[in-house]
Image: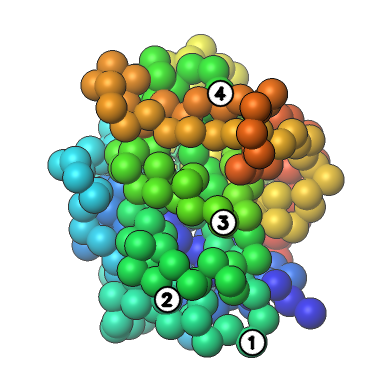
Amino acid sequence: MPLPLIIDCDPGVDDAIALLMALASPEFDLLGITTVAGNVPLALTAKNARKICQLAGRTEIDIYAGCPRPLLRPLVTAEQVHGSSGLEGADLPEPTVPLRSPHAVSFLIEQLTTAQQPITLAALGPLTNIAVALIQQPQILQNLQELVIMGGAIAQGNVTASAEFNFYVDPHAARVVFESGAKLTLISLDVTHQALTTPERLANIRAIGSPVSKAAADLLAYYGVTDAVKYGLPGAPLHDPCVIAYLLQPNLFTAEAAAVVIETQSELTLGRSVVNFQPVGAANARVMRTIRSAGFYQLLIERLERYVS
Ligand code: BDR
Ligand code: CA
């Protein structure tokens, strides 16, 4: 039975690669894609999700736009990583697939309220849409199988020393989610910085030779520069596709239970994920510790090879 899945995202290059991976995976029954403001403003994240579905030839997938800004703070974007369009590096045509109504939050609530089977949610951007859905209709938890989140840092952040981008952009939404009681799985920077797109891996993606792999390689070549230079790494961390890899092959990862709390008070450490592996009370998340990166790239390439030349 394919896994009923909704992907909430802010494409963004690594979101786009995650979508391409998911769209090539029959293990999922992809019920819809929701977008949120994050890497670029909402109008662009919604447009970019449509571009990627079109590139993948999956024009039947329903795409919904959600919240245009975080709960309390002004929107912070990441054009320095993803370019002004959010998908810099590849020249993708304007999408003709429509954006669906209603609002992404209404879609999430409607799906999670009426689902015959529990739904898994992949969260690849700031958690605004998901927090608003949980506030508006807390009963949706009953049908939420698992919420797999890319966000946070146990060690160093990537926006500030303390905070990772998705949690920094909307720390209050992250706090709502981590206090919700949902079954949470967290994939933080500590794992995604083990999943580097080295020049050799990038060449392997390009060598597939299809229009999809060319677009993916062009996007990753642009995206690779900022983070690799910033951290002195041999390639850029490929954050969001780790969530899809976890859903397909959880044995690529090791995990530990932890109590995760999000800092919302201090300007200095705003958006920090405080991860306690020896909680006094109950743990509220499974936190990934390691990924087998060779296996991860093998899986990614195998999925990208499914798109015909
Ligand atoms: C996260 O921030 C975004 O720029 C990426 O798409 C990813 O979701 C990594 O910190
Ligand atoms: Ca993202």
Q: In the rendered structure, are the residues bearing label 4 and label 1 in contact, judged by CB atoms less than 8 Å apart? A: no
How far apart, in angstroms, are the residues tagged by discs 2 and 3? 14 Å
Residue at image point 71% right, 36% down? 257
Q: Which mark is residue 154?
A: 4
Residue 191, position in %: x, y?
Answer: 64, 31
> Which amino acid type corresponds to the residue marked 4 in the rendered image?
Ile
**Observer-nearest of 246 and 280:** 280
Disc 1, SS? loop
Report helix, strand or loop for mark 4.
loop
Rendering coords of residue 250 (x, y %)? 78, 49
Q: Is residue 39 above or below residue 290?
A: below
From the viewer's perspective, is 112 left or right of 10? right
Q: Quadrant of residue 33?
A: bottom left
Q: Is residue 107 visible?
A: yes
Other-residue count near label 4 (Cα within 10 Å), few / some / many at <14 / 14–19 / ≥20: many
The first of marks 1 and 2 along the sequence is 2
Of 299 and 263, the residue lying toward us = 263
Q: Amino acid at mark 1?
A: Gln
**Mark sitting earlier along the chain (3/1):** 1
Identify the residue position indicated by label 3 in the image.
Answer: 182
- Type of the residue with mark 3: Ala
Using the image, determine if residue 52 lies above or below residue 178.
below
Task: Report, in whole angstroms, how far the alpha carbon at label 4 lies from the one at label 1.
Answer: 36 Å
Q: Which residue is mark 1?
A: 116
Instruction: Tell which tag, 2 or 3, sits nearer the viewer.
Output: 3
Q: Position of residue 23 (x, y in %)?
A: 59, 68
**Residue at the spot of label 2:** 109
Q: Which of the two labelled residues, at mark 4 and mark 1, occupies the earlier sequence position?
A: 1
Mark 4 / mark 3, whichever is N-terminal: 4
Determine the secondary structure under disc 2: helix
Q: Which one is in front, 296 or 105?
A: 105
